[in-house]
């Protein structure tokens, strides 16, 4: 007998429920699954999940819940607008679409999913069914996050520590130990979709990640190349690893890419998520002796902590690690074109103007009046580079001083340099969004754009960020209003 129940009560007739499910699964495959697959060359959620739902009702309910909620957000439940979607326009099930109440169906299928999930948790689940459970958790996280971060989203993420069900310390016995069966039955696609959610939660809530980033066996088994000291490791010595580190306050310049790509693009993107998660943990740990000290209320925090010298040493290791990643990326992570735009209305500067007119444009515009739209051929690489620039801003703005005992105004120069570099990285983030990204990528641009907005002081730059965030919500249905409100409070 299956550990997961095979059926649940439904008020809809079987034939109607089947037609409704077909419509929602089609939409899931065309839209929400792409959010989860945009860093996965195997297209697990759009190719494998639609096959799995035929025999796995919990997975079917989760996908239908997310699809119905997305239709409600982008079309407000209007059947006419739903039928205008390219993949719905010629559907033979238009009668079902016209009768569908998206909001009701999203809640109904969500309740079904939770029913299945609770039943599965109460039973002893075979290892070969664990992948389904964690795929459902990843989909439910998207279901909650499409509105805005919430306690329900964090509650779903609380399942992450159960990815590993061995005894504490078992994996630390040997750096070459094999993973337990509980993890061997979870695909890389599901694992990394959950890792991204964990990283996102840690950043938004300013907490430590739930997954242990120091568990070398875990990360190596899911595709990362890591040294014995726990650092990202290119296969051959890169400039960042083999030579003295350049000044941390220098803007990284494009380097000649390696002759051969040592990792496919999706695993390079995953490696960056692991690194930025380490940066977030560094920031949220403050100068506490243990990483979670600064998650406590102010009155409950320890009155002593790590020295500035030790914090700076940790910071430098993260800086070297991030540079090593940047120095390793292949040509696919390099922009194929840049187009200069006016910042005020983000329209192209005319290139075919007459000589006097062109000279007048050049004379009357400065770098603060314009911004580059940055175009990539691979959307996944584009948003990965946005994440890289976000990581750079986080690292720069949280650089410790060598000592707080030195009373000198000389460090003001360092502060100004940090602010200047942060703005340059922020403009790169916005430029990538201006380069034209597909809807499937847009949800992954929200947090980089938020970080970019924190760096800007000019009204024109701030309004650009607000406009880009609003466009994300308009095009993808993904909530961004909460981040716009956060920025407006900070400004």
Image (cartoon, rainbow, N blue to C red):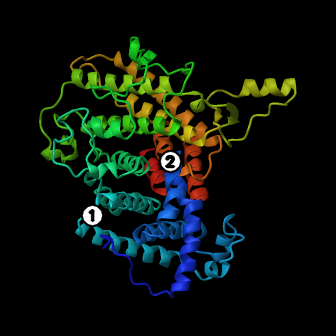
Residue density around tag 2, few if under 14, some if 14–19, many if 20 or more, within 10 Å: many
In the rendered image, which residue does mark 2 sit on? 444
Residue 258, given in percent of the width and then of the height, sits at 54, 21
Secondary structure at badge 2 equals helix
Q: Which image quadrant: the N terminus?
A: bottom left
Residue at 26% over, 66% down: 121
Residue at 34% over, 39% down: 221
Which tag, 1 or 2, sits closer to the chain's start?
1
In the rendered image, which residue does mark 1 sit on? 125
Foreground pick, 474 / 160: 160
Residue 464, given in percent of the width and then of the height, sits at 59, 44
Instruction: Report the disc number at residue 83.
Output: none
In the rendered view, would you say 20 is above or below 393?
below
For the view shown, which residue lies furthest in the right direction?
Answer: 354
Residue 354, given in percent of the width and then of the height, sits at 87, 27
Residue at 27% over, 19% down: 402
Looking at the image, is mark 1 or mark 2 nearer the viewer? 1
């Amino acid at each position: 007998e299956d550990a997961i129940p095979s059926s649940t009560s439904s008020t809809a007739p079987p034939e109607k429920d089947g037609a409704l499910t077909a419509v929602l699964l089609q939409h899931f495959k065309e839209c929400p699954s792409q959010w989860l697959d945009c860093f996965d060359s195997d297209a697990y959620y759009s190719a494998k999940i639609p096959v799995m739902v035929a025999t796995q009702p919990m997975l079917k309910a989760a996908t239908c819940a997310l699809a119905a909620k997305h239709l409600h957000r982008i079309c407000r439940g209007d059947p006419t607008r739903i039928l205008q979607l390219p993949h719905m326009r010629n559907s033979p099930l238009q009668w079902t679409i016209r009768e569908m109440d998206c909001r009701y169906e999203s809640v109904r299928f969500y309740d079904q999913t939770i029913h299945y999930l609770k039943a599965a948790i109460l039973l002893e689940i075979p290892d070969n069914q664990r992948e389904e459970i964690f795929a459902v958790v990843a989909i439910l996280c998207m279901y909650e996050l499409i509105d805005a971060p919430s306690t329900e989203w964090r509650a779903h993420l609380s399942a992450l520590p159960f990815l590993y069900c061995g005894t504490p310390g078992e994996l630390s016995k040997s750096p070459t130990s094999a993973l337990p069966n509980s993890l061997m039955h979870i695909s890389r696609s599901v694992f990394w979709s959950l890792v991204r959610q964990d990283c996102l939660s840690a950043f938004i809530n300013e907490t430590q990640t739930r997954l242990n980033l120091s568990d070398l066996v875990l990360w190596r088994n899911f595709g990362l190349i890591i040294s014995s000291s726990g650092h990202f490791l290119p296969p051959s010595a890169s400039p960042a690893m083999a030579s003295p580190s350049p000044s941390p306050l220098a803007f990284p310049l494009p380097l000649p890419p390696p002759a051969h790509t040592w990792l496919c693009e999706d695993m390079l993107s995953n490696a960056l998520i692991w690194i930025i998660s380490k940066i977030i943990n560094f920031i949220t740990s403050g100068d506490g002796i243990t990483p979670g000290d600064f998650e406590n209320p102010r009155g409950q925090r320890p009155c002593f902590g790590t020295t500035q010298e030790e914090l700076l040493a940790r910071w430098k290791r993260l800086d070297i690690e991030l540079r090593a990643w940047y120095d390793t990326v292949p040509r696919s992570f390099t922009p194929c074109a840049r187009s200069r735009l006016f910042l005020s209305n983000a329209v192209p500067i005319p290139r075919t103007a007459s000589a006097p007119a062109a000279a007048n444009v050049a004379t009357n515009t400065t770098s603060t009046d314009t911004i580059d739209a940055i175009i990539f051929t691979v959307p996944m690489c584009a948003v990965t580079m946005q994440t890289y620039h976000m990581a750079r801003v986080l690292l720069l703005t949280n650089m410790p001083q060598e000592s707080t005992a030195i009373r000198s105004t000389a460090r003001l120069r360092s502060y100004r340099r940090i602010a200047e570099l942060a703005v340059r990285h922020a403009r790169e983030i916005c430029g990538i969004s201006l380069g034209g990204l597909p809807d499937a990528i847009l949800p992954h641009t929200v947090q980089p754009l938020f970080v970019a907005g924190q760096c800007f002081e000019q009204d024109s730059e701030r309004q650009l960020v607000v406009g880009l965030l609003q466009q994300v919500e308009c095009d993808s249905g993904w909530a961004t209003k909460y981040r716009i409100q956060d920025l407006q409070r900070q400004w």
